[in-house]
Amino acid sequence: MALDNFITGAPTNLRSLEGHPDFEFHEANVNEPVEVEGDVRYILHFASPASPPQYDANPIHTLKVGTIGTMNMLGLARAKDARFLLASTSEVYGDPLVHPQREDYWGNVNPIGPRGCYDEAKRCAEAFAMAYYRAHGVDTRIVRIFNTHGPRMQVADGRAVPNFMAQAIRGEPLTVYGDGSQTRSLCYVSDLVRGVLANLERGDELPVNLGNPREVTMLQLAEIIIRLAGSKSKIEHRPLPVDDPKQRQPDITKARTVLGWEPEVDLEDGLGRTLEYFRSVVN
């Protein structure tokens, strides 16, 4: 069973599952109480806007889904004696002062900045998960997801990969913020899904980083996408957004040792797969 209110998603993403006998969909908002009949084995809580334009446009909803929505889903897990997995984020590290980021790093987050509604909601969600684990014995998991890309991302998502790909396909300038020296580590979606499932089965209650440890600057990423797209686009620099992290790279030692997981899809291979999808949807 899947629940979504489509605040950032789209019904078209479910077309491949239409008519599947083992799939059931309900349009619902997890910020409201959710009742599910019958047994529930797992609850995977992925609900939340996840890109700056999305949570800038929906800051209160973003705060609520990380707090009230998480509490509602943990309450359901407790009632159903189900294993609960929280999709947290590398944003809990903020603009990190430790590099690469390990799970025992507490982060450097501005709670009143424009990213605070997302960063602090996810930090609170982690606190809720640990509280339900300690107080009620709920079987919880926390995955801290680093930058991920793949098919079905929204063209106007606002993150670097969709922005760059849409601009390159259209022959528009690629907008790089600041001097482009800020780094990200990009994981292909199939690798992330394997990591989530591995943590669901073999993880513990403490957070685990899931992401690709290969670090790339935004300027390098723009140049790679221009080359893969065969585009003649130029690069255009714009002012760096407030609180934009300067570095982002996961230490995945725990994922390797506890889960037996690490990414398998090469950066350019994954970008090529994502680009193929964007060619089919960008006008």
Image (cartoon, rainbow, N blue to C red):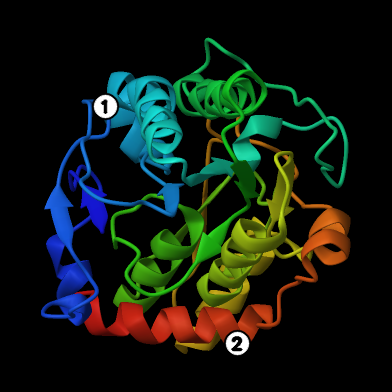
Q: Is residue 253 visible?
A: yes
* Image position, residue 93 (x, y; %): 71, 32
| Residues at discs 2 and 1 in contact (Cβ within 8 Å) | no
Give SS at disc 2: helix
List x then y, in percent, for residue 233.
44, 74
* Position above or below: 218 against 129: below
- The residue positioned 62% from the left and 16% from the top of the image is 110
> Which quarter of the picture shows residue 30?
top left
Q: Which residue is mark 2?
A: 269
The residue nearer to you, when weighing 145 against 27, is 27
Along the viewing direction, whichever of 282 and 227 lies nearer the viewer: 282
Q: Quadrant of the N terminus?
A: bottom left
Q: Residue at x 32, y 70 (%)?
A: 152
Picture residue at 25% right of the left edge, 84% below the top: 280
Where is residue 203 drawn, in percent x and y?
Answer: 71, 54
Looking at the image, residue 14 lies above or below residue 126: below
The three-letter code of the residue at mark 2 reads Asp
Q: Amino acid at mark 1?
A: Asn
Q: Residue under circle 1? A: 31
- The residue carrying pointer 2 sits among few (fewer than 14), some (14 to 19) or many (20 or more) residues within 10 Å by Cα, namely few
Q: Is residue 97 left or right of residue 191?
A: right
Q: Secondary structure at mark 1?
A: loop
Q: Nearer the viewer, residue 58 or 268?
A: 58
**Alpha carbons under labels 2 and 1: distance apart:** 38 Å
205 vs 39, left or right, is right
- Rendered location of residue 97, percent (x, y): 84, 30
Front residue of 80/65: it is: 80
First reached walking from the N terminus: tag 2 or tag 1: 1
